[in-house]
């Protein structure tokens, strides 16, 4: 009886050793992939105060002031239908004009755009036809002008909102 037990144990060990030699260690998974519409805009900070301090004798138009110290960056994967709009939180009185100019290598800059009265709901286009990709560190330029007829205006803060939209 001992001999028989030894043969059975040896046969079982031989069978497991043969199965290990041909085993496979793999498994399959279904992986779902996708990319949503992404469009982001960021700005570097606030421009310097735009305070008019000079005029030319005999001319109603005072000497405008400009600032080009800030920039913006965008990333978008939607297509050539996106644009950047600008609006101001409180309209400027007649005789005062605020213009903004955004440079762009991914879209068409519309140059100096008057945003003096472009409040919420009436934002104006400043860059159009923006292509997919990224546009980094592009200049934001502001020009503030006034007429002498408009009178003095104490320093006041306005919020300009730039929106990347379709």
Image: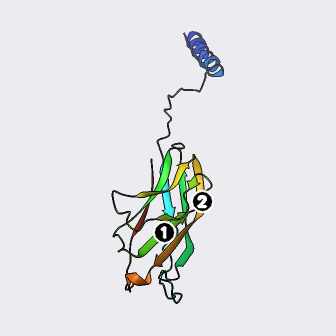
**Residue 135 quadrant:** bottom right
Q: Residue 99's mark?
A: 1
Q: Which colour scheme is used?
A: rainbow
Label 2, residues with CA under 10 Å away: few <14, some 14-19, many ≥20:
some
User: First in sequence: mark 1 or mark 2?
Assistant: 1
Q: Residues at badges 1 and 2 in contact (C-beta under 8 Å)? A: no
Query: At which x and y percent is residue 126?
Result: 50, 58
Of residues 146 and 141, which is closer to you in this image?
146
Please, is residue 143 above or below residue 40 in the view? below
Element class at badge 1? strand
Please, is residue 148 above or below residue 85 in the view? below
Q: Quadrant of the N terminus?
A: top right
Q: Residue 55's mark?
A: none
**Residue 90 quadrant:** bottom left
**Residue 67 quadrant:** bottom right
- Discs 1/2, front: 1
Query: At which x and y percent is residue 2?
Result: 56, 13
Q: Residue 136's mark?
A: 2
**Residue at 48% in and 32% down:** 32
Element class at badge 2? strand
Query: At which x and y percent is residue 86?
Result: 44, 61
Q: Distance between the residues labelled 1 and 2?
A: 22 Å
């Amino acid at each position: 009886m001992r001999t028989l037990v030894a043969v059975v144990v040896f046969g079982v060990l031989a069978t497991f050793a043969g199965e290990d030699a041909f085993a496979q260690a793999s498994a399959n998974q279904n992986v779902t992939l996708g990319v949503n519409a992404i469009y982001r805009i960021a700005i570097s900070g606030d421009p310097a105060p735009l305070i008019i301090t000079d005029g030319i004798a005999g001319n109603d138009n005072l000497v405008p002031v400009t600032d080009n110290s800030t920039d913006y960056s965008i990333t978008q994967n939607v297509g050539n239908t996106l644009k950047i709009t600008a609006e101001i939180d409180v309209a400027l009185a007649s005789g005062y004009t605020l213009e903004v100019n955004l440079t762009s290598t991914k879209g068409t800059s519309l140059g100096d755009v008057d945003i003096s009265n472009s409040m919420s709901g009436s934002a104006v286009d400043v860059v159009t036809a923006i292509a997919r990709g990224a546009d980094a560190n592009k200049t934001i330029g502001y020009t503030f002008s006034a007429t002498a007829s408009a009178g003095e205006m104490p320093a006041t803060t306005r919020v300009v909102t730039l929106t990347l939209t379709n």
